[in-house]
Image (cartoon, rainbow, N blue to C red):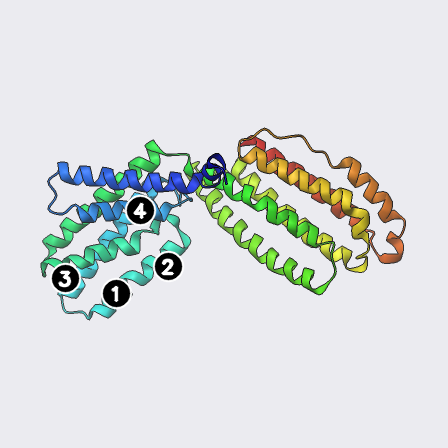
Amino acid sequence: MTLPRFIREHEIAGLFALRMGLSAVLAYLAAALLHAPETTWPVMSAIIVARASGQSPGGSAFDRLAGTLAGAAAGLLGGWAAHSGMPEFVVLALVITPLAFLSGDYGAFRAAPVAALIVMSAAETHGSGVAPAVLRVGDVGLGALAALIVSRFVMPGLPSRALKQAIAELTEPLFKYFALSWRSDAESRESFAKLSLRIRRELRDATVIARGIRQKRNGETESPENRLVAAAGRVHGSVSFIARALENAPELRERALPFISAVRDRLNSIREILEGRASTPVELDTALNALEAQIESFAQARHLDALPFLLRALKDDLDELAGAASAL
């Protein structure tokens, strides 16, 4: 593998690591300048918040700061409850469970459970009392603020890059999924089902990223990012319907090879667009027209009346996917 290709394939991981590193360094410098008693906790909080955002923004940077501070405040209450004599396992359940629930539905709260544990650990380290826990809340806030500054002002475009890479990496599985839809043997059908689950999972992850970007744009629904994920999902759905229609005519595959090849080239061109490379225009009409003529010869006998419509729908979905990729 050449160095340029390695850099291109791992660009998002490298930028993600850079974001975490910058957040940690900024938190350390801030703690040192403020003469904080400990520099470990601000640095750890910065890393946790930067990692919690990951490739998905999880709401705006300010939302993440607020969510992390909410977790720290919950930890402060938990420390007070433990100091008052409540059993520690009960305190943990009462504090962590609601925060974990919130973190599952709201990206802003992803770092909240760990922030609460950091604050609650102050009592174990420094003994009972509110002052150590309050100081630890300040440490958490300082680290979260450092991560906010880096993600908001230094590296604000990482989620959009991550989304483009996620969809670019989906183009190959989508083509394999389409190619398998024309096969009827048991091994191919099993591979088809497994690949469908993988694509669904990766589409779900991409949807989370797009949802976070939408939140940063005050709920904008018609963004290119949302169009991109929706179009990729429709391609997957169209192929699933095509596979069902082809159950009665597995021998069509040989006649469909030119169209299958054209779909592969179309998806490759979409990947090139998403990766910022020069893309060769690919049209599907010629291969699709030829395939439709083949289908018409025995469509009525094999109950394939819907297949031409489904293939046209797939072409439209690929056009929409290419348009959304170009818009980004």
Q: Which residue does the numbered mark 2 point to in the structure image?
A: 101
Of the numbered discs 3 and 4, the one sitting upstream in the chain is 4
Whether 157 is drawn above or below 242: the answer is: above
**Disc ID at residue 92:** 1
Under mark 3, the amino acid is Glu
Q: Nearer the viewer, mark 3 or mark 1?
A: 3
Which one is nearer the viewer's eye here, 140 or 176? 176
In the rendered structure, which disc, 2 or 4, sits on the residue that comes first in sequence?
4
Between discs 2 and 3, the one toward the N terminus? 2
Which amino acid is tagged 4? Val
Q: Which residue is mark 4?
A: 49
Q: Nearer the viewer, residue 150 or 210?
A: 150
Which residue does the image show at 39% across and 40% down from the upper left?
14
Whole-percent x, y for residue 93 in the image: 28, 66
CA–CA distance between discs 4 and 1?
21 Å
Residue 43 left/right relative to 277: left
Is 232 placed left or right of 246 in the picture?
left
Q: Position of residue 164 (x, y in %)?
A: 51, 39
